[in-house]
Image: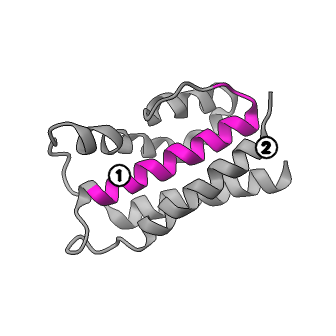
Amino acid sequence: MKDPKHARLMLDMAAADVQAVRNMSDPGRFADTIFGFHCQQAVEKLLKAWLSLLGVAFPRTHDLRLLLQLVADIDPAGVAPFQSLEDLTDYGVQFRYEAPMDLGALDRAAQTEGIELLYRHVGNMIETA
């Protein structure tokens, strides 16, 4: 069942992570692991908002690949611009709770742009729902 109320809640929760991402552009001040974590969290919440709007049940997960696939099953063209965000999955768990891996430096400008685009996209969907 479509749940615009839950979608709005997830969008509002994502707003804090989106704001953090906007303010962490300087790698000298914030490690990639911290920046990446907030990127992952923002994307996770935004995808869960989108899925709530679509009426798709989703498991309790931090796996952006899975969440993107669930959206793609319903809206493959709509999710296509956001597929590259799946690479942030490892920042949600790997760097917070497990031994860090070297994934290389994040392109902060590109990640921020992609997250901003997803945030606006989901926000617009909620407003028109």
Res 37 label: 1
Name above or below for residue 70 compared with residue 107.
above
The x and y percentages for residue 32 are 25, 59
- Lateral position of residue 52 relative to residue 116, left or right: right
Of residues 77 and 102, which is closer to you in this image? 102
Name above or below for residue 122 compared with residue 92.
below
The answer to whether residue 128 is visible is yes
Residues at discs 2 and 1 in contact (Cβ within 8 Å):
no
Q: Secondary structure at mark 2?
A: helix
Q: Secondary structure at mark 1?
A: helix
Q: Quadrant of the N terminus?
A: top right
Dominant SS of magenta comes to: helix
Q: How is the image coloured?
A: one colour
Give the residue at x 76% y 51%.
125
- Lateral position of residue 57 relative to residue 61, left or right: right
Give the residue at x 51% y 28%.
60
Give the residue at x 14% y 38%.
99
What's under tag 1, amino acid-wise?
A: Phe
Quick one: label 2 or label 1, which is nearer the N terminus? 2
The x and y percentages for residue 4 are 79, 43
Give the residue at x 58% y 48%.
46
Of residues 123 and 94, which is closer to you in this image? 94
Name, please, the residue furthest toward the right.
129
Res 107 quadrant in image: bottom left
| Other-residue count near label 2 (Cα within 10 Å), few / some / many at <14 / 14–19 / ≥20 | many
Q: Please state the extent of the stretch shown in magenta in the rendering.
A: 34-57
Q: Is residue 15 magenta?
A: no
User: Can you identify the residue that label 2 sits on?
Assistant: 4
